[in-house]
Image (tube, rainbow, N blue to C red):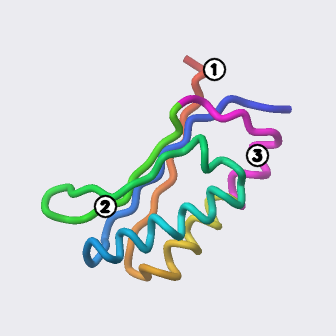
Amino acid sequence: MSVNIELALFVDGLTGREQAWEVVHALAAVLRDERIDDEVGIGVGELDGEFIVSGESEYPLVITRFYAWRPAFERAVTEAVGKVAPHARPAVEWGYPDER
């Protein structure tokens, strides 16, 4: 069964702009592997003087077997960020538009 899902990514605890862009490239690879890179935009910003990485789906993603895909995707995000920014704090947030 498929569900409509909204996806938001956020990474803070970065050492600077260069590390933030390394995280963007690492996350872009995860999104490419999952074939949602055209549907989720990510980039670098500044929040309270710190560099962050954030992104979100432009519209709901249609995910089959979301209950099985979600933990693997979250693990892939955490591992990708950890490889380039070990002290960073990645977060993945989900929205369920059909429940509104």
Query: What SS does tag 2 mark?
Result: strand
| Residue extent of the magenta highlight | 59-72
Q: Residue at position x 64%, y 66% from top?
A: 75
The residue where tag 2 is placed is 52
**Residue 18, quarter of picture:** bottom left
Q: Which mark is residue 69?
A: none
Quadrant of the drawing holding the N terminus: top right
Three-letter residue code for mark 1: Asp
From the viewer's perspective, is residue 76 above or below residue 48? below
Amino acid type assigned to the residue bearing label 2 in the image: Ile
- Residue 29 at x, y = what percent? 61, 65
Spatial separation of the CA atoms under disc 2 and disc 3? 28 Å
Residue sticking out furthest to the left: 49
Q: Is label 2 or label 1 in front?
A: 2
Residue for badge 1: 98
Neighbourhood count class around disc 3 (C-alpha, 10 Å): few under 14, some 14–19, many 20 upward: few
Indicate left or right for 43 with 38 as reference: left
Q: Earlier in the sequence, mark 2 or mark 3?
A: 2
Tell me whether the residue at label 3 lies in contact with that at label 1, contact meaning CB atoms closer than 8 angstroms.
Answer: no
Residue holding disc 3: 67
First along the sequence among labels 3 and 1? 3
Residue at 69% over, 57% down: 71
Look at 44% across and 82% down and name the residue there.
86
Figure quadrant of residue 73: bottom right
Q: Amino acid at mark 3?
A: Tyr
Q: How many marks?
A: 3
How crowded pointer 1 is (Cα within 10 Å; few <14, some 14-19, many 20+) is rated as few
Q: Position of residue 64 (x, y in %)?
A: 81, 39
The one of 68 and 51 positioned closer to us in this rendering: 51
Label 2 CA crowd tier, 10 Å (few <14, some 14–19, many 20+):
many
